[in-house]
Amino acid sequence: MKLLKIILCLIIGFSVTHCNSITKKAEQTLPDLEKPPQQLQNYETAYFASGCFWCVEAIFESVKGVQEVYSGYAGGTEKNPTYEAVSYGKTSHAETVEVYYDPKLVSYKTLVKVFFGSHDPTTLNQQGPDRGPHYRSIAFYKNEEEKNIIKDYIRQLTQDKIFQNLIVTEVKPHTLFYKAEEYHQDYEKLHPTNSYIKNVSVPRLKKFQKNYPDLLKKDKH
């Protein structure tokens, strides 16, 4: 993996800090699973995995009707996963975001549209320069209605030939979401000079914003 990273950086001509190459900042333990803060308890939640959660969190936070987004881990079986374990492929979890949204302002179907419109769902275990099962594409559902919305949208994308290759997104029931360590939250916003943020996260965010201007908050960054 490290050799692949070095080769990739040489090919594209600049040094990019991968989402999984953060140095271990004073080993932080994952907080226990908690109920959402009081101000979020009246909002609905949705869960998606589509590559580095720094990028995905920033994308969903720019969408109208989304109140808050947390980066974390889901889709695996191991309890209380840590960033180090997930990023080095020691778990079956994927980097995932938890989206709190107001269904009066944005529908679940629109969030699914944001999900598929902001990453390549045809690349297995990869998004851009990031590779590994923890970067795989997953749409999580909490009930049959959400499951049907996801599957219907995939069928429509396939029928309309939006993507040249087969969509490999996993459609899985939501079980547990483990919030990532605090230093990962709002990472794109708080670290604008980070090389990965500048060269990968921001271009991905800007591409989404350009393609879906009608879905954006007025105060998007």
Image (cartoon, rainbow, N blue to C red):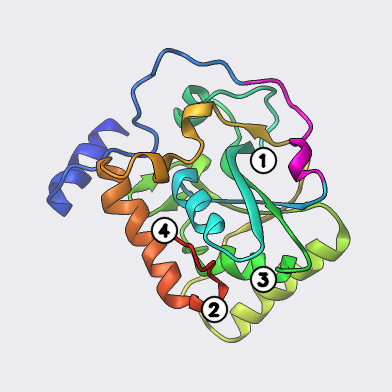
Q: Secondary structure at mark 4?
A: loop
Q: Which residue is mark 2?
A: 214
- Local crowd at mark 4 within 10 Å, few (<14), some, or many (≥20)? few
Residue furthest top as drawn: 26
Q: Residues within 10 Å of mark 2 (few under 14, many from 20)?
A: few
Whether residue 116 appears in magenta in the rendering, the answer is: no
Q: CA distance from mark 4 to mark 1?
A: 30 Å
Which of the two labelled residues, at mark 3 and mark 1, occupies the earlier sequence position? 1
As helix, strand or loop, the secondary structure at mark 1 comes to loop
Residue nearer the viewer, 41 or 168? 41
Quadrant hosting residue 94:
top right
Residue linked to disc 3: 110
Of labels 4 and 3, earlier in sequence is 3
State left or right for residue 57 relative to residue 194.
right
Q: Which residue is mark 1?
A: 75
Q: Are marks 2 and 4 in contact (CB under 8 Å)?
A: no
Give the labeled residue for mark 4. Answer: 221
* Span colored in magenta: 31-41
